[in-house]
Image (cartoon, rainbow, N blue to C red):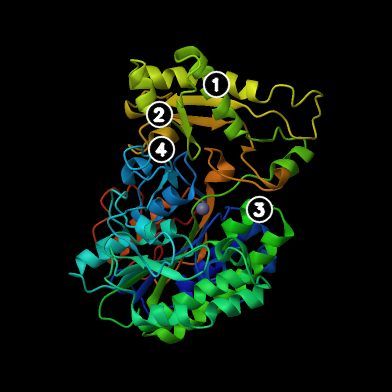
Amino acid sequence: MRKVSGLIVAAFVLLFGVGANSAQASAYDGKPKLVVILVLDQFRGDYLDRYRADFKAENGFNLFLKKGAYFPQCYYGYANTMTAPGHSTIGTGAYTNGHNIGVNEWWDLSRSKTAMVSSVQDADYPLLGASTEAELGASPRNELASTLGDEVVLSTGGKARLFGVSLKDRAAILTSGHASQGAYWIEHATGKWESSTYWMKDLPEWVKAFNSSDAIARARKEAGIPGGDFYERVGATPTGVQYELDFTKALVKAEKLGTHDVTDVLTLSISSTDILGHAVGPDSPEQRKLLDAIDVQLNDFFDFLNTHVDGGLANVWVSLTGDHGVATSPVNSAKEGMPASVFPYGAMTAELNKELDAKLTPGKATRFVLGGDLPYVQIDDGSFAAEKMDERSAESMVAEMIPGALAAAQQGQFPTPDSRTLRPSTVRHVYTKAQMAAGDLPNTEEGQLLLHSYTTNGGWWVYLTPGLTNVPAGHGGMGTGHFSPYNYDRHVPLAFFGSPFVHGTYLEHAEPVDIAATFAALLGVNRPSACVGRAVTEAIRREDGGSNTAPAH
Ligand SMILES: [Zn+2]
């Protein structure tokens, strides 16, 4: 039904020219003043349909659902469904094998033997505005591809303004890219906005003013959270979203985004849906309430853009998507009879280390398995090399041991079979890095996803596909997570708003890599260096004012 009604509206636009932006007849010469790449973190592809009746604001999610081009069948084309690769993929239009960001953080023993490094950590560029850990630094050094924003800046000889904002560093940095004038995110403990010397010598006055205003105190008061970690606590509430949007408004005003002769680009990733989602799961009333609040907050934000961009919203193009989906909370899943479990990652790596030590270096308590962010299980190349093992043999040994070690780690924990409670975790497939590098993968859908999940980061590792709804989940299994190749983790919405797009709901397969490809095509700039997406031509108005959509669509 929805598709049909979308088509009727689209037909209306064709016949009578009453689209939201009918003033601009041609998509191809109508360069916008501002492109906004909007991301909601942990925004599963079914939310917009599931809660559609809740969305009352005219220009909140309805900007996309009632005036834009909406693709509910959008899936990531790789298996490593995590935040850092998701944002990099949205910005670059490439998969992990193109931009090389595999996970949020990983062990790099050449840089640290005691802590993982984050995907954006770079000690060469100290943090600005941070009262703690400034020396860790940040930059897009690990992102080995250009972004849509980078290409717009390059094509305008540096005239276009490009900025990235998020509560999370990786989401602000990897989506906007290398050539921006600034990426901004918050220090977790205090909520203060920070950046790094990669982009600037010192924070601009307007950022300092924002940090020294009463914005943080007001946010804490409104959220009823006087103390504790700002990111974890205030960040999980609608107040956290508003705090982020207020900063973004200050940025738009200070940098006069959308008022230049060339197209400016803003990437904005709302983190709160992920912070809350990990704690309560996708089906909780709290998550629904947060989405309803964001609907109203986005309406307000787009109203703001309407008054601050030259020519208003008619000169703004916006894409909306998520960086990954999420699994149903294991407890809720199990209640319905699904084979769900809380994946005991720490216990599994401890068991692997115990067994490997007994086998290779009895009594020495050697650390062979490092762990790190799933779906990659990192191993210590030095420990294996000391035992005269090369990468291929070390990874193969660990891959073969994983199912048994996982079973051993759960021994005796599930004595009575019960189809309605949590079950033992299982592993479906394990592949080695050497195998993935050589493309030695099964000729299956999963094999294709894995080819796209290859990264050179993280030394030696194996990749694992867990059983269905097997996630490391806190809160007794009420919390949840994401990292698998399953559709619930790969499914996110995709939607466009702006003069080139013919309103409607499009059931074609789409992917987040299509965002960069579509905007690059419409703006007439080079596709980002490793972009593999397609322009969504079925939703783009033709130069003669018609639609490219086939009549039978
Ligand atoms: Zn995320």
Foreground tag (4 vs 1): 1
Element at label 1: helix
Q: Amino acid at mark 1?
A: Lys
State whether residue 275 is above or below residue 491: below
Q: Amino acid at mark 3?
A: Ala
Q: Amino acid at mark 2?
A: Asp
Residue 258 percent location from the top left of the image: 35, 79
Q: Disc 4 designates what residue?
A: 453
CB of mark 3 near ligand 1 (< 8 Å): no
Element at label 3: helix
Foreground tag (4 vs 3): 3
Distance Cα–Cα, label 4 vs label 3: 26 Å
Residue 528 percent location from the top left of the image: 28, 54
Q: Disc 2 designates what residue?
A: 380
Res 264 → quadrant: bottom left
The disc, 2 or 3, on the residue closer to the chain's N-terminal end is 3
